[in-house]
Image (cartoon, rainbow, N blue to C red):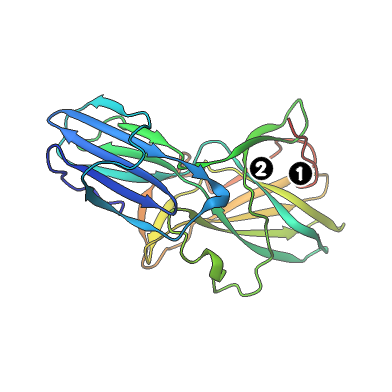
Amino acid sequence: MWEFFEPKNNQWYRWDLNGASAFLKKTNRIWQVIFNQIAFQNLQDTFGGPYPVEFPEGKDKAISFIMGEGEKAALRPYLSSVPYLVTVQDDIKIMPDAETHFDVLLPPLLRFEITPHEEPLAEQMPFILSRTWFGDSMSGTPCHSLPSPLLPRCDENILAEENANVQSLIHCKLLVRNTSKTVLDLKQAAIFTEMLNIYEKDAHLITDEVVLDSLNGGNLQMSIRHGQKKGCKKLSDSLCGGKSEVLVRRGVNFLKKMTSI
């Protein structure tokens, strides 16, 4: 699915992306690309590619024409540099010294890449997301707003069944720990992606575990558990490769306040 392959000349190829789709055609040194986006709420089970097709569905969509050397191409997943904002479905209170786990599905930014290593042919997020503002109006951060609410994970070893077939999304484990002396009312959480790698395991995309620690004084400490990913193939590296931890002070009351734009 995400591997480089050598396309035949003048042949269209299609990738099925859980309802969204992408198309690629090579004619000598000219590459043609089409992305068909869908709303995040309209996810389907279809996944796979590249498949040779006679013509791309939705051919009325804009076609990008790119000149580029190279004989091979791949559709590759990346995390957006814009943070993802997630909300909880019901009020969740985390007592001092307690913790809770979540599964988060992060829509990827997809890039058509060719060899040898050059700039991407084209890139697009296949799922349409709304933007929102996280934090106060002075020091907040624009984010992608994820419509799927956070639900506490009851079984730490099994991914929720309804998410099992969404292979185009990046599965992220989120651990929230209350290391302060007061009760934490969890309503939103922002996931910053600079330190996250992407891996493939059992035909699913996964990333490193994100750990959010609520500290005294209103600050939140974000750390990443990279660890050893047995049976995983790394597909992309983090933007801040060497860092393992960062103090996040973006916005006021990081987990508690979100001002919409």
Q: Quadrant of residue 132?
A: top right
x%, y% of residue 49?
Answer: 29, 53
Q: As rendered, which of 148 and 58 lies closer to the eye?
A: 58
Residue beneath label 2, please? 247
Q: In the rendered image, which residue does mark 1 sit on?
A: 219
Point 14% across, 38% down: residue: 71
Q: Dot 1: within a 10 Å radius of its alpha carbon, few (fewer than 14), some, or many (20 or more) residues? A: some
The part of the image, by quadrant, that contains residue 76 is top left
Q: Indicate whether 124 appears above or below 49.
A: above
Image spot of residue 156 (x, y percent):
60, 72
Residue 129 visible in this rendered orientation of the protein: yes
Where on the picture, by quarter, is residue 63? top left
User: Tag 2: Cα neighbours inside 10 Å, few (<14), some, or many (≥20)?
Assistant: few
Helix, strand or loop for disc 2: strand
Q: Quadrant of the C terminus?
A: top right
- In this picture, is 159 found above or below 83? below
In the displayed orientation, state which residue is furthest to the right.
182
Residue 241: image x %, image y %?
45, 43
Q: How far across and down, in percent of the image, does residue 207 sit?
A: 48, 55
How far apart marks 1 and 2 lie (CA) works out to 8 Å
**Between disc 1 and disc 2, whose residue precedes?**
1
The residue at the point 59 percent across, 43 percent down is 192
Q: Nearer the viewer, residue 210 or 180?
A: 210
Residue 261 placement, left or right of 194: right
The image shows residue 154, relative to residue 54, as above or below, that is: below
The N terminus - image quarter: bottom left
Q: What's the residue type where badge 2 is placed?
A: Leu
State if disc 2 and disc 1 touch (CB < 8 Å): yes
Amino acid bearing label 1: Asn
Q: Looking at the picture, tell me which residue is in the foreground, 195 or 150.
A: 150
Q: Is residue 76 left or right of residue 98?
A: left
147 is higher (above) or lower (below) than 163: above
